[in-house]
Structure formats: structure tokens, C-alpha cells
Amino acid sequence: MIEKMKKYITQIFTILLLTVFSIGSFAQDKRTLDTKVADILAQMPTKDLVRRDRVINEVIQLGPEGFQKFTALLVTPGEGDDTAVRFVINSCSRYASEFGKEKEKDFVEDQLLKALKTQQNNDVKTFLLNELNLVGGEKTIQAVKVYLTDDFLAEPANQTILSVGGKTAATVLLEALPKANDKTKPTLVKALGELQCVNAVQQINPFANDKNPAMRKVALEALANIGDPNSFKTLLTAAKNANFAYEPANAAEAFLKYTNRLGEKNETELCKKACNEIFKANQADDKLHNYSVALAIYTKYFGTEVQPLLLKAVESTNKPFRVSALNLAENMHDVAATRAWIAKAQTVQDETKAEIIGMLGRKGDPLATGFVKESLNSTSEMVRVESINALLKLEGNKATPLFIEHLAKGQDTEATKTALLQLLDQKHLAPVAALFDKTSGKTKAAFIDLIAAKSGKEYFEPIFALTKSGNADEKAAAFNALKKVSAENNLEKLIQLLLSVNDETEIVQVQMAVVAAAKGVEIEKTEKGKLLSALKTTDKKDRIITVLPEIGGDVVLATSSGYFKNSTGATKEAAFKALTNWKDYSASAALFEICKSNTGEFRAPAYASFIRQVRSANIPDDQKLLQYRKVMPFASTTEKKTQVINSIGNLKTLLSLVYLEKFLDDKDLQQASARAIMKIALPGNEQPGFSGKMVKNMLEKVASVITGEESDYDKINIKNYLEKMPKEKGFVSMFNGKNLDGWQGMLLDGNPIAIAKLSEQEKAKAQTEADKKMLENWSVKDGMIVFSGKGHNLVSSKNYKDFEMIVDWLITKEGDSGIYLRGTPQVQIWDTSRVDVGAQVGSGGLYNNNKENVRDPLKVADNPVNEWNTFRILMIGENVTVYLNGELVVDNVKMDNYWDRSIPIFSEGTIELQAHGNELAFRDIYVREINAKTIGLTETEISDGFETLFNGKNLDGWQGNNTDYFAQNGEMVVNPERGGHGNLFTAKEYSDFIFRFEFQLTPGANNGLGIRAPLEGDAAYVGMELQILDNTAPIYANLQEYQYHGSVYGVIPAKRGFLNPVGEWNSEEVIVKGSKVKVILNGETILDGDIKEASKNGTLDGNEHPGLLREKGYIGFLGHGSELKFRNLRIKDLSK
Amino acid sequence: MIAGAGFTIIPRHVMGGNGFITPSDQLTKAIIGVGGMGRGHIPYEGTRVVAICDVDTKHLELAQSQIGYEVKKIHDFREVCQLPEVDIVHVATPPHWHGLMAVEAAKAGKDIWCEKPMTRTIGEGKRVVEAVNAHGRMFRLNTWFRFKDNFYGLGTDVKPLKKLIESGILGWPLKFTVSGITGYDWKFYWSGEYNLKPMPVPENLDYDMWLGPAPYKPYNPERVHAKFRGYWDYDGGGLGDMGQHYLDPVQYLLGKDDTSPVRIEVDAPQQHYDAVGSWRRIEYTYDDGCKIILDGENKDKDAAYIEGPNGKIYRGFRSDIPNLKSFIETLPEPEPQIAVFSESVKTRKKFALNEMNGFRSATMVNLGIVAVRLGRTLNFDPDKLEFIDDEGANRLINQPMRAPWTI
């Protein structure tokens, strides 16, 4: 939408805008009015309210002529696009409607009225009238009254007048009424009613009998609103004619409303008379709600006088009516009424008595307490239950002893328990437990329930004892309570009980108690635990095995697994259930085995449980995806497949997207996969979205197929995201899944140095042969690249410089392979069981690195042989980072040149899949080429010619102190305690440039940005230094102004107060051109000066600054011993 | 005077145990507005559909085919209110009709099941409360997180949280942050299209009746079915659509069912006069310092869902207070709530989410909408239900209706 508007503005105002920009915003404002108007329109809509207010204030400053320039641009809907203009005008009225902006409001009102006169189109006029709703006053009423009899404009004009309100409004409406036609009359009559215009009664009266019910409705309602005593008969007759039933003219409601108005206007007698008319006419069951309204009116205006009416009302057989009367009674705060209700309660049937008691409870008059207490002994259950509820409200905690006593009598167990549950907490259970000995059966059971509900662990013993009770209720309650009152020291007793009871329910309950007692107890995870000890000796093994998933741990898992494999019957069943119920990921391998090797009864639950365990496992997303893909072939139904797809939707990885995409064409799985793809690709909590052409196509497809209740939101989300998605190429596939296009055979053992020496002819010939050989040993099968176990590497046809690649690989027993980067071995792949060659360190390491460099991976993250693994490899400059199955195994390590150890790794080369004499396979190979010069740049910056100065991974492109300055998590971190020395400078020199960067300070941090500096000497003098300083720190309280952050140190002071709070990131732009220096901090220009000017009569600090005369030099960070961070360093060289 | 003869007619409803029992021993309902949302009301438990109403004949056909037995199909909702066989009127139209229809149903003596947001202005909400009370009606609002279902990112219903807050262990005042980070998959925007072209009204739709009380604007399909939330005249975007779902349980947890915030601050782009735009943040403050923050851009990365001076509750019920869950088990229970509307209709005890507390949470939505539309901080008097020192904002409390519609 915004795009559309931008286009429109571009079309109309391009020329004007160019004028604006060429003048430049810092020059004196000599823009013409049209230019200013265009400039304002170009800013619509503003992205925040501060900007809106600033722009709208500018609009108002333009004065009447300026404002009319805007209104002149309004067009009829469908005949152009005036969106920006409408934004401006609407915001003007919103802005001017704020408290205290009287002048602005007056101005906007005048201007809107002026525009209203000149505009001819009704839709445009309507828009202007609507805007007057917010800012209109008396002037508006006079100006718009002409529209009150206009068929089209009567409604909006009337709304404007009503928004202003007041006497004048009523007068103009009344004047217009005789001139109105059938279409505009209802509008005017309705408004006169809303303004309660007494003078209008006579004119409105005739419409009360109009043939048209809509007209009748507004007339009757208007008369009701006005509340003139003379309308009594008219309104009553109408209501009676309608038999006080609901009908479109709303005559009954009009009379009710009128009655209320009479009360409001202090027409006491007439109001009472009206109420009586309502009472009389509305005694039938379907009219009693009208009766209720009259009672409410009576209560409102005559207070306690209504009491007899309410007392009478509860004699009705109609419950809603009784309750509505009691609701009125509830809000009458007088003691006499309470007394009357208590008396009344004695005379009515039980249901009504209960309702009255309920009301007394809600009313909260303590006078009723005694009566309610007595009612606890009523013979009617309904009455007793309401009394309990009422007493709870009246007495709160004070009622606890009474409720306990009531419960002890064995009555109203549920209601009393519900009340006590609201009053008791764990600390106040003693009086409840005290009644164990004095009660029995259901009553005792209720007390046990209460103790259990508040986890009364203190009372384990008496409750445990009751599991042996001869009374069925007591016993059941005790068993049920065990899980809530058991603790570790009860475990032994509980195990004994578990192995001795026979009832199914009791077994389950004791098992839950065992879990409560043993969960989290470390020793229970070992052979020495009471549970595993008991398991060995008992023949009721299934009972203990069932609780094991809650206990967890490797020993317990192995025990369960063992019983599944080696036993039969109930024990095997229990062990299987235990595995499927396992609480963490550790049982997943066992479950997958079951899923794979069993069919029938075991497979489906094992499958479901495997999915659940993977989903909740604390393992990287790459690994989760591998697990889901592994189990997908066992999904036998659409529902099960959908479950996997939904789960993959939680994984923020590219391969998840790739895997899901194929389901978009499956009609059963389309919606699930569309939603899953959307969830992954779009930015989520904390995480950015995926970008690139592949992802864009995928999302476009998702938007076109997604349907269902919330899909409108989804489509908006996708559209919004695609609009702002970085336009980079992103990942591309290196393998089409069908053949080996894009790959070639290996020459000369893959030695790039030797290959480079071949002539073109020699190379072409060798390549033809190598390619032929390649096809003998490498093939494509089921979307995989498969190696037969003989031959050479598979080599990419293309060379790569900096890149990120993703590849899935699988090796067989004794397997050995790897990925060559830039034609060089290698990121290692091997079977970790090959201890003889040192493979126990795991795959992913840079195997051929020099001895003194890092070679081994950080950890073993391999999946078992014959299972898939995922590599994510990032190579920037000489450095390599490797993730194996989502685990970081190589952290930004320099890769050495295997072919010639005296030189650094080649700056570009092929990616190769290594072959080593074992069968192996690869799939899903994706690569994203990285232009290190544009990392982190916006598209505008790229097209503007900016380059990245920091790749986020290492200090390529910098010189000097690369010890204290280092790359971490994409940031350049400064830690002066690492023992480095000196400053950090760019590799190249710059003269004129725009340098943009972000920095994050620690309290009191001090650094500096060297400009045109030499590599030696104090850059503040022999070059220039722009301060980077937390000048909010108390230690800098007495700084000179030329020392504040951003200042050209000692020469030109910067404005203070625009640093973000310490710990937040700041963005800064430094523009150096000739002798001019400009510094923009967080969007605010804090320095804009000329070093020549500033130093012509000596510098501020009085020191010599020979560096000011230098034409070029290095950009550097001038450390002063503080910790801080930089990121997003980018530069545009203006001298080019 | 009123006992005796006047009350001898046997009541039609299944109330008080001595009345007429409908054939299936079920209460009956009529659904007004059977677009996607209204058709969702057909299977709601405990009641049987006897009539459906819509201004689009296609909606009526779709709904009828979904019901499976013949019901009355009605064009004008006022005829629905006149049907003696209807116990409960469901209002599932766009929000610009909610208040008006709820009031009309009350006038006709019907109980009401109303879609969220309860009303699209504060003034209309006030009228619903008055009418429902005066006519002695039962009312339920169609959102439910204050009494059932998992409470978004907390992985539980509201009950344990309510117990915890009432225990006072978190201290006071509390701050709630509602954002993606705290577990709300919140829909913070639903934008309308600008500069709509007038289009011919399709034959199946009575557009004038669809607009009803809303100002006349030329027809365009963007305005109506499934899209209306993008226009201020009918709703308030994602805030109108989803706001009450998210704000109502918070209001319950804070114990603010009878009051409203006193200050509303917004961070949003400039808004269009007609089409709803996005917003980033709305901050509500109550007079005791409690705050609710709708954080649309997850600005506060460490946000706890609930934060008090002595403790925090994060997404997934994580907390900096140790053993919180077992502590909660030891606490008193909150007052039980009636969570089945047919039970309310029969016992005449207020439903858990009724016209009173529903009005307050709808008011929160509407306060947010007014603040976003006007683009300024608002101060509000929760008793008078008026903005303080802001006539412009007060003009948005009641918005005039097109004749002959009144509320």
C-alpha cells in the first residue's frame, strides 16, 4: 500500500522533489510553497508520531494558502490517488483536536470549512465533514447547516453537528426539519432527540404515527429522549398498540426510555405513573423483562420506595425475573431492606429463598450473617448450598471453622469443600487433620481430599494408614491423596505398598505417589536406588517399570530397554510403555530401533513417541531435522506425516525449508507444509527470516496456496516480509538431484598448483578423461550422489571465494571422506570407531592443518555410520567455521594450504567431495557465495558504492593490534587485557570518505576514531581523532567541550546528549571531505565543521595539530584501555 | 398486586426447573451473521440452532448446508429478535453491529452470546451493560481464556496464575508484557487498503444493511467479508480482532474487572482516516501503577510475562521464584467461575465473562484504538468513562449512527 502511494508521489512530484534535494536541507529554506507541499506529501505516512506531529505542525505553519493547496488535491474516490493528501488533512484535524491546541484547531476548522465550500464532489465533501467531527465548533454548525436537507450530505453533516452538540446545533436542526424530505427526516428527528430538544416535540409528534416503522422508531425514540411530559400519551399509546412487544418501531422501548427520562428530569409523579403503566401491561412471562426495566427505573429514582415492589417480584414463578429483581436489591445499601429480605426469605419456596440468600451474600451486609448461618441447617439442599456461598462472601476466613464443622456433619460435601478450598492453604490444615479421628466414611474422605488439595505433606502418615481402612470411601480418598502428600522419605513404604496392592486404580495411584517421592532423587537413577533394587527381586516388575520414565537417567533407561528386549508379557509391555513415555530425548534411539524393526502394535506408539521426544529434545535444529527425516518413511497416514511437517516447522534451518517444499504439491500435506515453511522462513521471536531467491519463490508459492481461517493474516505477513526481504541471491543448489551437472572429474590428484601449470589444451583433454572416469565411480540415485568406493574426488565446476555451504553426508562402516574447500583438503569425515587413525575425535576437523594450528574438531558430533549428518561450513578469508549436525566443531580456524605449506590458502577454488575407498553418499548440497565486501550492507549502500570494512569473522583488511581487537559473533571486540599493543588501522589509506559504524560502550569507555592517520605517532595530533567516549560517566564530568564524544579532538566540539544509554548500540556516520568533517550520531548531526576554519586562529586546545594538513591516511581505532565493541563497519571512498 | 393471576402463565424457557422443556432438552439459539465466524457458532455446545440471519444470501445458504436440518433463514435481525422460540441470540456480525444488536436482543428479552470485540466504541459498550442489566438478561462474550484453555505461552490455564497473584508473592504493582517473547503469537496488525475504488454491489449482498449504523462509503469488496477489520468504521484491525482475547485474561488476573486504565500511550506510524494501519506498542497504566504492555515488535527482549517487585513469570511458566509450581499447589483456590453459558442461562448466575467485565476489557481495546487513531497519549477517568482534557478523544466515545439506527 505504501508502495503504491510512493509511486504516485514519485509520478506527480518527482521534479519538485529533485528541486528540494538539490537545494539540500541545510541550506536556508527558500523552497516555494508548492515544493513545501510536495515535500510534506512525500513524507506521508510518517513512521512514528513524533515525526507526524513535526510534519503536521509544518502544514499548519504554511498558513491558509498552504492548507488549501492540500485540499485542492483531493479527488473523488476512483478518479485518482489522493491518499497522501488525506493523510495530511486527517492528521491535521487529529493533531489540532488535542487539548490546548486552540489556535491550531481554529485554523484547521476554518480551512476545512473553506475547502468544503469550494469542493463540489459529495464524497470529498463527506470526507471534509468527517474531519470536522473532531475540530468543529459553532462556526461549523452555521456553515454546514445548508447540507442538512441534502439527500447525500444530510447524514454526514448531521453527524458533524451532533459531534459539536449544544443549543445551536439543536436550533439549526429544528430549522431544517420542515424543509426535509422523507430521506432526510429520520436523520434530523433522530438528532433532535439525541440533543433532547424540547422545542422539537410538536414537530416530531406527527411522525410518531408515520406509516414507515423506521420513521416511527426515530420519532418515538426522539420523543422519549426529550422526555417532555406532554408526550406521555403519545408514547404510551404507541407502546400499548405494539402490545409492549419487541417490533421494529421499538415503541415499547421508547416508553421505557421515556419513563427513565422522566425520572432523570425529576418528573416524579409522571415517572411513577409511567412505571405503573409498565407494571400493568407487562405481567405476561414474555414481557417480564420490560417489567424488570421499570423496576430498575423505580429503584434508580425512588430508592427504598421500590422495596415492596421487589419483595412482591420474587413471588413470581419466573426465575429470570426474580433474579433481576434481586440484582436490584443487591445494590440497595440499607439495613431495613436487609431485614425485610430476611423476613421475606422465611415465607417463600426454597428456590426463591436460596436466591434471596445468594443476593444477601453478594450484597455483603453483615446483618444478614446470622440468618445465613441459620440457613446452613435448612432442610433444603439448594438453600444450604447458597448459604455456604453467601457465608463465604460475608465472612471470608472467619467462616472456616464453621465450614469445617458443617463438613464434619457430613452434609453438602461438595459445596463445603469448594468453599474451604478457597479459604485454606497448606499452613492452615491442622483443624482439618484434627477431624480425621472424629469422622468416618465420606466425611473423612472429604477431609483427606482437602489435605491433598493443598499438598499437606505433614499428614502423610495418617493418610498412608488410611489406605488400609475398611471403609471404601476413606480408602479411595487416601489412595488418591498419596501423590500429593508423599516425599522422598516415604519411598520405601510406597514401594512396599505398590507391590502389595491389587486394585488397578490403587496401583496407578501408588505409582503416582512413588513418582512424587522419587523424582529428582539422584540415587534413584542408579542401581543402588530403592526402585531398581526392588525391581530385581519382585515378580511384579511391570509395576515398577511403569514409573521409570519419570525417574530417568542412563542406567534406568538401559534397564528399561533390557526388559523390552529380553522379557515377555506384562514386563515387556510395561518396558515398551516406559520407553515411549520417556521424558527426554535419550530413549529416542531405542524407539527408532523399535519403529524400524517391529511392525504392528509396537510401531505406531514408538513412532509417535519418537516424534515427541525429538520435538522436546534440547538438540540443534539441524539434528532434529535429520531425526524427523529419518522417521518420516514410517509415517503411515496423512495425519502422521502432518505431525512431522508441523514439527519441522519449528526448525529454523534452510534444509527444513528445502525438505518441506516438496510437500507443497501434495494436496493432503499442502496446508501443513505451507504453514511450516512460513513459520520457518519468516522472522520469528529473536530470529531473522530467511532470504534469497529460493526462499522468495517458496514463500510466493505458499502465499498462493495457503487457505483457512487465519490465512489473511498469513498473506499479509508474507507480503510484508517479501517487501523488505534483502534482495540477495542467497543459497543455491549445487546438486539438481537428477544428474551430475555442475560437477566434474578430478585432475592431477586435485593439486591446483599443478593444474594451473597445464596448458588450456592439456587441461581440456585431461578433463574429458577425468569426467569419463567420474561417471564410472559417481552416480545419482534417489536424489543422492553416491560413490562406489573407487576413484577420485567429485569437483565443482565452479570456483568459490568466500561462501557458506550446507551438505548432508552419510558414510558406511570404516568410512573416510571429506569436503575440499578451495580445492584443498579438507573438512574431515570419518567413522569415529577407527581409533587406529585417530577418528575418535569426530568429523568436521581441518585434517590437513599444520601441526601447530587447530586440526581436531571441538567435540564429537557425528551420528552413527549409515545415518545422515549435516555440515554447515562457512569460509571467509582464510578462516573456516564448521557446524556438524548443528554443533560448532570448528570455530573460525585458519585453514592451511596443504599443497604448499609456505603460502596461505588460495583465495578461490573448487568445492570437492572426497573419495577414499568406501561407499558413501551426499545429498542436499547448497552454497551461498559471500561477497566479503558487501557483508551487512543494505542494498542502497551497495548501489551507493559502500564496502564492508569488517567481515565479522576475522580482521582481514586491518593491520596493527589484532590481539586486543578480535572478531566474535560478528562483532569487533576490544579487550585491552589480551596483551596486545597499539592501535588497529585499516589496510588501506583514505582521504575523503563516508564511514559508517556502530559501537557499544561500557561505562566510561574511551576509544577514538583515527582519521587520515599515519601508522605511528599520536593520531590525535599527527592525524585527526574523533572521540568515541562514554562522556556520561562521572569520571568525565569536567571534560572540555572539544573532548565530548564525536568531537574532532581538541579542534571542533560536538553536540552532547545523543549517545544511547551505555550498553545499547549507537550508530554513527562520519563524512570527511576536504576540510569538512561531519558526524551524525544516532540520526542527529552532532558535528558539522571545517578543520581549516576551526584551526586558522589556533586550535581550541591550543596544541599543534599538524595532522589536520594531511590529505590522506589510515582509519583506525585508537584504544585507550577500555572494553567496547564495534560492528557493521562500512565505508564509501569519495575520492574514487 | 403482581403475584397471582399475572404470573400463572407457564414460562416457555427451561428455567427454574418448572418450565417448558424444548424437545431436545436444549436451549435454542439464533445466529445473526453467518459468515466464517458465525458459522463457527453453529456447533457450540448445549444449544440448538433454530434460525440464522444474514444480509448476504450466500452466507445463509452456506450456513444452512452446514446445519443439516431446516432452520429459519432471516434477512433482518429484528425479525430474529421477534421469534418466540429463540432463547439465545448469537451476534457474530462485524463489530460495528455488535453493540446495537446486543441491545436490541436485550430489549426483546433474549439472552446474548456476542462475538469479540464486544463493541467498537466505549459508548456502545456502556449501553450494552445498561440494556442487559435493566432487562435482566444473561450475556457472554465469545472469548474464553479467563476461564478455560491454555493461556498462550504459559502452558496452563489462568487459575494457577490467579492463585499466585492473589497470594501476593510477586508484590504490587504488576507489569504484564504481551508480546511474541512472552508467548503470545500476537497479531499486531491488520492493515486496510488505501484509496478504494467504488465498485458495484454484488446481488447477493444488502450492502446498505451491512453498513447499518456505519457511515456510508462506496462499496468495495475490501470493506466487507473477511476484510472489514482493516477499516476503522467497522473494527480496529488486529487489536480489534484479537485484543480482547489477550487483554481480558490479564484484566482478570489483575483483578481489574470493574475499572479501566487511566493512561494509554502508543507508538505507531501515522494512521489513515479510513484504513487501519499497524502499530508497535500500546502501554496501559492503571491508577495503582499496574501496567499492561502490548509489545508488537518484541522490543523488550528480556520481558517477563508478569513482572512484580518480588518476582517474574516468563513464557512457559518459568520464574525466578524457586519451586513455584509446588508453592501454587498449597494456595487457596480462586472463586469458581461459570464456564458453560447454558448453565448461566438456566441458573441466572452471571457467566464468567459477561457484559460487565467484558465491557471493561472491550474498553481496553477501544482505548487502544482511540489512542492509535488520534496518535497521542490519553488520560482516562475509569468511573466517568471519559477522557480527561481531551475533547477530541471524547468525541470518539460515542460515534453517531446513521438513521434510523440508534443504540
Image: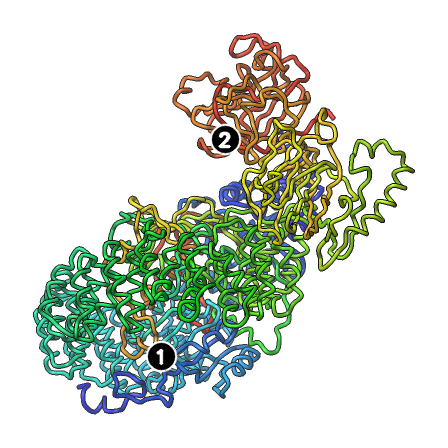
Determine whether A383 is above or below A728 in the image: below
Give the x, y percent position of residue A910: 75, 40
Q: Nearer the viewer, residue A203 or B329?
A: B329
Give the x, y percent position of residue A854: 60, 31
- Position of A803 with respect to A968 (left or right) is right
Quick one: quadrant of the N terminus of chain A? bottom right
- For disc 1, the chain is B
Q: Nearer the viewer, residue B139 or A252?
A: B139
Displayed quadrant of residue A381: bottom left
Q: Is residue B220 visible?
A: no
Dot 2 falls on a residue whose secondary structure is strand
Crowd band around label 1 with a 10 angstrom C-alpha radius: few (<14), some (14–19), many (20+): many
Have a look at marks 1 and 2 and say if they share a chain.
no
- Position of A849 with respect to A472 (left or right) is right
Residue position marked by numbered label 2 in the rendering: A1000
- Position of A1001 with respect to B87 (left or right) is right
Residue position marked by numbered label 1 in the rendering: B110
Displayed quadrant of residue A972: top right
